[in-house]
Amino acid sequence: MDLEFSPEHRQFRDELRAFLEGWPLSGAEAELPLEEQEQLFRERGIEAGYVYRNIPKEYGGSGQPLDVIKDSIVAEEYARVGAPGNRIDQGPGLLAPTLIEFGTEEQKREFVPAMLRGEVRWCQGYSEPGSGSDLASLKSTAVLDGDEWVINGQKIWTSNAQDAQYLFGLFRTEPDAKKHEGISYLLVKLDQPGIEVRPLKQMSGGVDFNEVFFTDARTPADHIVGERGQGWAVSRATLVHERNLIGNPNMMREHFDQAIELARTTLRDGRPAIEDPVIRNRLAEIEGYVRTAELSNLRQTTAAARGEPLKVMLPMMMNKLYSTDTMQKITSLAYELLGSDGMLAPTEEDVASYARTHTPSGYVEQYIFSQGPAIAGGATNIQLNIIGERGLGLPRDLRAPKT
Ligand SMILES: Cc1cc2nc3c(=O)[nH]c(=O)nc-3n(C[C@H](O)[C@H](O)[C@H](O)COP(=O)(O)OP(=O)(O)OC[C@H]3O[C@@H](n4cnc5c(N)ncnc54)[C@H](O)[C@@H]3O)c2cc1C
């Protein structure tokens, strides 16, 4: 086993580290609003070839030759210094790679560059009331009327729809086909008379989820991704990117390092909590999980770099399952370390930062937030079933009778 990077990759890491010394910005640039600073640094990252590496230049990426080891070095180094790299919201994180794979030339040119720059925000309209785990049972319809689709129905749990201008979603277009074969993947403008977005308030106080209602809403006929009735296959591609994002070990490491810092700085009976053998034990146990995730990630990266066919579904599913579970362990420990500060309500900044603030209320937000990813992108029970049945060939789970 050779765990050394090649001279080329070591040099790449050195150059990247030098580039990342430019973050945080300094001088007059440091006075800009944070979002503008992030966008500025992101654009520098695109120019230097580090950000959106695998998206061609004509669609706004940096169009670098495929190199999964460089990709993983970039992800690691950006996470280490907390610099803004690829946007991870639904547009750039999920839809952009899906459009690169399945979209038409017009769709790629029209939509991808603006979503990468963050100028047009997207949300994901899959789940419906009663169609979450059993997504293929979805009922919202789209009917072709001349050169437009006419859409009716309802989506739910639509993250960030309140800030989005467009939705990519699944709609039933072939009512007589089998349930998986009757679905199409459509791109829909939200700001139109037939669409109402209603926010859902969460227990953390944040409002990230929405219900989206469609009443004779319209979208052009060519805003379909993939073929008519083939939306299920397209949506599986998006889901792989979603599970990859959730299963990212760098985020786990970032949160774990913060928990260690918290244990160092929190006092228990007048001594730093990290000196308490029970806390040390738990940290050591979690370190084992985090290292396993990192090594597993390296193993997958090595296999991909060698061009070995990865059984895509199984490792991705395992990554997601493992990372959501470990993140819950990390955030529970941090939450317990807070003691009575654990009663603090998360601030707006904690919520808006996607649980990345390192304040007592920020750790409360991390704890609350960590419950969600185990459900998003396919709940844990469903992941276990798929890994067991399709990955390991175990007998199928009992199905409830259809009454
Ligand atoms: C943080 C977060 C963000 C989300 N963002 C989006 C978004 O942007 N767009 C979107 O479309 N959706 C989004 N969702 C919704 C998400 O996809 C669904 O919540 C998820 O698919 C589960 O569906 P459900 O909520 O309807 O639960 P259900 O399907 O009703 O499941 C309820 C429980 O029953 C279990 N269960 C169900 N069926 C089985 C079975 N056959 N065997 C064993 N156990 C089973 C599940 O594991 C779960 O524990 C988001 C959810 C979360 C938590």
Image (cartoon, rainbow, N blue to C red):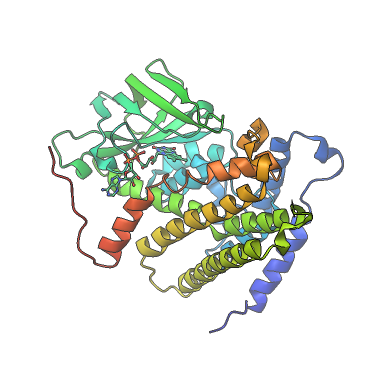
Viewer-side residue, 126 vs 63: 126
Viewer-side residue, 329 vs 10: 329
Viewer-side residue, 136 vs 356: 356
Residue 354 in view (yes/no): no
Tell me: residue 53, above or below residue 88: below
Tell which residue pokes out farthest to the top in this image: 193
Measuring 52% from the left and 46% from the top, which residue is drawn there?
Answer: 370
In what quadrant does ligand 1 lie?
Answer: top left
Tell me: residue 258, above or below residue 232: below
Residue 301 in view (yes/no): yes
**Number of numbered discs visible in the structure rendering:** 0
Tell which residue pokes out farthest to the right in this image: 27
Tell which residue pokes out farthest to the bottom in this image: 1
Q: Quadrant of the C terminus?
A: top left
* Residue 18 image point, x, y percent: 77, 61
Measuring 34% from the left and 33% from the top, which residue is drawn there?
Answer: 222
Viewer-side residue, 59 vs 376: 376
Find residue 342 and report its image quarter.
top right
Find residue 214 and report its image quarter.
top left
Tell me: residue 13, above or below residue 85: below
Measuring 21% from the left and 39% from the top, which residue is drawn there?
Answer: 182
Position of 378 with respect to 283 (left or right) is left
* Residue 23 image point, x, y percent: 76, 50
Position of 265 with respect to 79 (left or right) is right
Measuring 42% from the left and 48% from the top, which residue is drawn there?
Answer: 98
Tell which residue pokes out farthest to the front in this image: 269
* Residue 134 image point, x, y percent: 27, 42
* Residue 118 image point, x, y percent: 59, 37
